[in-house]
Image (cartoon, rainbow, N blue to C red):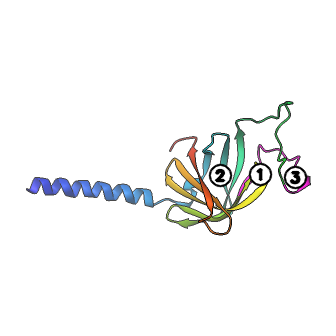
Amino acid sequence: MTKRFLSFVLLLSLVVAAFSAQAAAKPDDVLGIWKNGEGTGMIQIFKKGDKYYGRLVWLKVPNNPDGTPRTDVNNPEEANRKVGLKGLVNMRDFTFAGDNKWEDGKIYDPKNGSDYSCEMTLVDANTLEVRGFIGVSLFGRTDVWKRQVKK
């Protein structure tokens, strides 16, 4: 009986430790290079001051059919349509909110030239849920990103 009880206590301790380790994300745990869910791009999340940003650092299709680098052709501002997609800062102003969440950010989708409110949730060290939405988080879409250099 005592052996069973000790085994149970050990198992319970391991489960609690695993959950505690996951729940103890630090603000900079989101930094790194992430591949989007479609596998069409990689975004480097970086920090400037106390805010977090993301820039496109790799594209599956980096060039147009004529060989020229792809640009932000769907940008609503005509002057920005010639800006290259590679290096484009498409995520901005995120703050760490605790509980593995970064909130109050914006994400720009170059596919349609739209800007969305956004939040990120670190599911585990190598999985990031990125949710873009209009208005409230209920009306949006979540994409699952994978870290490119595993932790």
| Residue range corresponding to the magenta coloring | 76-91
First in sequence, mark 3 or 1: give its number.
3
Q: Which residue is mark 1?
A: 112
Q: Is residue 142 above or below residue 36?
A: below
Question: Relative to 52, does residue 44 appear above or below in the rendering?
Answer: above
| Callout 3: SS | helix
Residue type at tag 3:
Asn
84 sits left or right of 95 in the view: right
Disc 2 to disc 1: CB gap under 8 Å? no
Residue 7 spot, x, y in % from top left: 18, 53
The residue drawn where x is 52% and y is 55% is: 122
Q: Is residue 82 magenta?
A: yes
Residue occupying the far right of the picture? 79
Camera-side mark, 3 or 1: 1
Q: CA distance from mark 3 to mark 1?
A: 14 Å
Q: Which residue is mark 2?
A: 45
Q: Is residue 69 left or right of residue 93?
A: right
Where is residue 149 drawn, in percent x and y? 56, 41
Q: Position of residue 8 (x, y in %)?
A: 19, 56
